[in-house]
Amino acid sequence: MNKKVLIISSSFRKGSNSEMLAKEFEKGAKKAGNKAEIVSLRDKNIGFCRGCLACLKLGKCVISDDAVKIAEKMKSADVLVFATPVYYYSVSGQLKTMLDRANPLYDSDYRFTDVYLLATAAEDEKTTVEGAQKAVQGWVDCFERARLSGVIFAGGVNDAGDIAGHKGLTEAYEAGKNV
Ligand SMILES: Cc1cc2nc3c(=O)[nH]c(=O)nc-3n(C[C@H](O)[C@H](O)[C@H](O)COP(=O)(O)O)c2cc1C
């Protein structure tokens, strides 16, 4: 209740399946009285991390693009939610780039304690989401106060909008309601 929930939606596709999960999570979180916001990476200008590590001294990235503001929002949220299509058994490149660009938060007084992964894929095997989950878990493990609190995977959806009626949508709504 009354938590600040930041949902980062990383698919660039219109009518995106993973963005539908993001919207359901947002709906649930708002229903339970939380403040929830979806930030889509679709219309953002986000460059690759250059690895200079200046961020650890400055507290912010030297590249001035949209990732700076998104990283600041991530820092002050109670709950972070990453929505991604499975790309080659991992997260999307655009989500991975944003996670790298959030490096200024490492060793900072970040607020988040709970992280959720929402993922979609064409295949629907138990193993399909494992790589994406591992990628996000690896990021979460670098933030001591945070834990990966939930993974919602909607498999068997390939074309945009295929997710309509998928049970993952209800799961995302319920997870949002219970943050
Ligand atoms: C570059 C690329 C790589 C993909 N790799 C996988 C994959 O490894 N496994 C899989 O099941 N689906 C894969 N897919 C299919 C997407 O995960 C699937 O279409 C998903 O529903 C897209 O979600 P979105 O609508 O949110 O973008 C891939 C799609 C693209 C474009």
Image: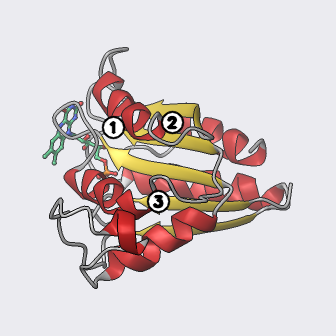
Could you tell me which residue is drawn at 69 percent across and 59 percent down?
Answer: 27
- In the picture, measured across the screen, residue 34 lies left or right of residue 45, that is right
What colour scheme governs how the chains and residues are painted in the rendered image of this protein? secondary structure
Q: Secondary structure at mark 1?
A: loop
Q: Answer yes or no: is residue 156 visible.
A: no
The N terminus is located in which quarter?
bottom right
Answer whether labels 1 and 2 touch (C-beta < 8 Å).
Answer: yes
Q: Position of residue 101 (x, y in %)?
A: 31, 62
Q: Residue furthest front?
A: 57
Q: Position of residue 115 (x, y in %)?
A: 57, 43
Circle 3: is it few (<14), some (14-19), or many (20+) Cα within 10 Å?
Answer: some
Q: Position of residue 107 (x, y in %)?
A: 49, 53
Q: Residue furthest top?
A: 126
Q: Disc 1, ligand 1: is the CB inside 8 Å?
A: yes
Circle 2: is it few (<14), some (14-19), or many (20+) Cα within 10 Å?
Answer: some
Nearest the camera: 7 or 109?
Answer: 109
The residues bearing labels 1 and 3 have C-alpha atoms spaced at a distance of: 34 Å
Circle 1: is it few (<14), some (14-19), or many (20+) Cα within 10 Å?
Answer: some
Instruction: Tell which tag, 3 or 2, sits nearer the viewer.
Output: 3
Within the image, what quadrant is residue 63 found in?
A: bottom left
Look at mark 1 in the image and give the residue it sits on: 157
The amino acid type found where label 2 is placed reads His
Look at mark 3 in the image and give the residue it sits on: 105
The residues bearing labels 1 and 2 have C-alpha atoms spaced at a distance of: 9 Å
Could you tell me which residue is drawn at 27 percent across and 62 percent down?
Answer: 13
Within the image, what quadrant is residue 30 found in?
A: bottom right
Marking on residue 166: 2
